[in-house]
Image: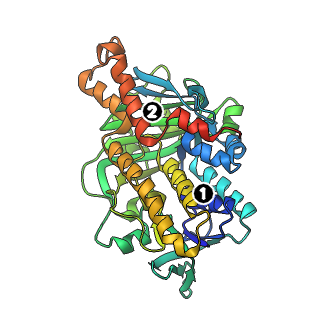
Amino acid sequence: MNVIVLGAGIGGLTMALMLHARGIPVRVFESTRALRPLGVGINVQPSAVAELALIGLLDRMAEVGVKTAEVCYFNRHGQLIWREPRGMAAGYRVPQFSIHRGEMQMLLLKAVLERVGPDAVASGWEAVSVDPDRGSVTLRPADGGSDRVERADVIVSADGIHSAVRRQFYPDEGLPVYSGRILWRATTVGAPFLTGASMVMAGHANQKLVTYPISKALADEGRSLINWIAELRVPGSTPPKHDWNREVSLDVFADAFARWTWDWLDVPALFRGAEKIFEFPMVDRDPLPRWTHGRVTLLGDAAHPMYPIGSNGATQAILDARVLADQLAGTDAAGAPDALLRYEADRLPKTAQIVLANRGHGPDYVMQVFEERAPDGFAHVHDVASQQELEDIAAGYKKIVGLDIETVNAKMRGV
């Protein structure tokens, strides 16, 4: 049994480490010529952190990421709606990490090169097409040379939301589905807010701020590298791919947040402190009827791109990798297609449910409730929603995404 992974993002690199831990040879091909620590912040939920801890990466994550202490929901007036502990503060045996996406990727890359081998990741090779029956992939070099064909018993496509492999199987799918909302993302070095390890969502469905610290090094110095996302409703069609991740100026969106100055955070000042601001459409794709075709399957954003709500993008890719590696362990080449179908049967319905839940705003729904019922603010939170209603909203999403404490902690017994 041997495997080719297409894509050296968080999902693809985790897949390589999971396979190596089970004694399965693996090679990774990445379209980018040189992997660099790009991006902004992400959150990795305890369910995924537990899986990474089982392959010896917990200490490495703790060296760079912030252990998230709580999640807080506020209305657009800066009034607290709901607060709950996260990670170890909530009773998990592992943390939730707020971490720079690029640093997370580099951490995984270093582990792959150390464990699998210095040649385990080949950069500058873009997947053009696959043959699901023969288990082959045609790769095109970034330098303009000749295509080459590589073969394996299994090909895992972890090449992101614009996956060429997904497009081969679903050529009429078209562009990702646009939510009607634009995200502006950046980081700012500033003073810690709230606990110094708080994750904050503020606003409502059509105007929202998400912010949290992502650097342990700065936290140790008493400062904070603050990841932030500003979101506004901007109806229209999906912006073309070449407009994604473009750098924009503050005046594109900042006026809408000009009055968001609260006693615990000055949002306009937060925005002004960023060196570079990048613009993204908030998009996903409709759940697919199948991921697996012969010896080829999809993983992570190639399989189930979802809105960045509830901190589940990287988490679900890591969980994909664990389930797929488990299904392939002990399987020979002849049994590989059936192993891929078992993986799909486990993960496809779970992730499809999350994609659809996020379209309904996921746990952020609580902010919309308060915007509709009390747009001018409130004297007391329970004048707007009962404690039971607040708890039910939070608990419902946790059940969907697999954040049951007992289940996560059971994985860590003996570790």
The image shows residue 147, relative to residue 318, as above or below, that is below
Which amino acid, by three-letter code, is at mark 2?
Pro
Percent position (x, y) of residue 193? 55, 26
Q: Residue at x 42, y 60 (%)?
A: 303
In the foreground, 322 or 97: 322
| 384 on left or right of 313 | left
Of residue 346 and residue 400, the one placed in the foreground of this image is 346
Residue pointed to by mark 1 = 14
Whether pointer 1 and pointer 2 mark residues with C-beta atoms closer than 8 Å, the reply is no
Given the current orientation, which residue lies at the most extreme top position?
Answer: 379
Residue placed at 68% from the left, 29% from the top?
A: 222
Q: Is residue 258 visible?
A: no
Classify mark 1: residues with Cα within 10 Å, few (<14), some (14-19) or many (20+): many
SS of the residue at dot 1?
helix
Q: How far apart are marks 1 and 2 (CA)?
A: 37 Å
Which amino acid type corresponds to the residue marked 1 in the rendered image?
A: Thr
Residue plotted at (32% across, 73% down): 171
Relative placement, left or right, of 359 versus 27 is left
Q: Which of marks 1 and 2 is nearer the N terminus?
A: 1
**Can you give x and y, in whole percent of width and height, for residue 364 in the image?**
37, 34
Q: Residue 268 carries which label?
A: 2
Label 2 crowd bin: few (<14), some (14–19), many (20+), radius 10 Å: some
